[in-house]
Image: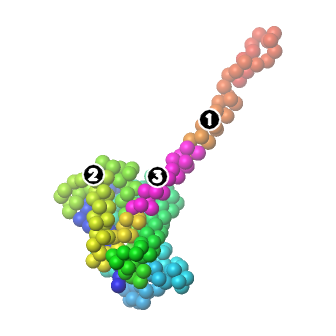
Amino acid sequence: MRGRYPSPTGLSYSFGPGMSPAIKMLIVANIAAFVVSWFVPEVMLFLGLRVADVIGGMRLWQPVTYMFLHGGIGHILFNMLALWMFGVELERMWGSKFFLKYYFVCGLGAAATTALLSFVPFDIFDHLYTALTVGASGAIYGVLLAYALYFPNRPIYIYFVFPIPAKYFVMIMGGISLLSSFGGGGGVAHTAHLGGLVAGYLYLKGGRLHIISEIQYRFLKWRINRMRRKFDVYSGGRANDVDRRVH
């Protein structure tokens, strides 16, 4: 049984031209992995996420490699389109290093969610332990969440017609994934969608960005004050000096 999770379809927005370095690298890596898996299908079993294999200690790399594989042309097309549409602006704002770290945190969070739910004693989650999960959508759902947090009122045109603010779009997609996860999902790993969203939210709201910004601000303020003390005018010299101003 294979679980795959495609990115949301039917959405569009007019973004700036060009492609940022990390996005380009991720897209190239995903396309390369897709081509290899197309000609060598056995790669899917080796690199796709199967909780039973990871827990058994056989293939510990799968929580990373699974997000570079896709189940079909439509699957990878919409995933990479969403990654480009929403990821470029985030990377330019954060920098490539932090964007990549965030991307993989969300992808790993999606894998961890799938693994944890596979041990929940409910019939709807029984298949997760042995199912094969592939796709970058866990990470990309995290990218969507970050975009909605930073640009909540940006319009996203569903099916190129209906505009909806990014914050509501992500709420809708999260709600769909939540409801679908209880209905089996038809082979789509909706639990991984939720895992990517939750991991991204916790990572951003955990204060990391705020801490980094605060440290940078404090350091810059310290340097400014230091330079000010060096060049500002202040009283000095002896009491009987005619001019006691020292620069």
Give whichever of discs 1 and 2 has the lower sequence position: 2
1 and 3 marks in contact (CB < 8 Å)? no
Which residues lie in the magenta part?
197-215
Residue 130, horizontal then vertical, whole percent: 41, 83
Residue at the location (45% across, 64% down)?
Answer: 106
Q: Which residue is mark 1?
A: 224
Residue 149, relative to residue 239: is it above or below?
Answer: below
Q: In percent of the image, x 38 and y 79: which residue is there?
A: 126
Asked if the residues shown at circle 2 and circle 3 are in contact, with their CB atoms under 8 angstroms apart, the answer is no
> Residue most toward the front?
121
Q: What SS does tag 1 mark?
A: helix
Nearer the observer: mark 1 or 3; the answer is: 3
| Residue 218 placement, left or right of 104 | right
- Foreground tag (1 vs 2): 2
Residue topped by disc 3: 205
Location of residue 57 (image quadrant):
bottom right
Q: Quadrant of the N terminus?
A: bottom left
**For mark 2, what is the residue?**
165
Work out whether mark 2 precedes mark 3 in sequence or the reverse, and give the earlier one: 2
**Label 1 vs label 2: CA separation?**
40 Å
Q: Is residue 64 magenta?
A: no
Q: Secondary structure at mark 2?
A: strand
Three-letter code, disc 1: Ile
- Mark 2, Cα crowd under 10 Å, few <14 / some 14-19 / many 20+, is some
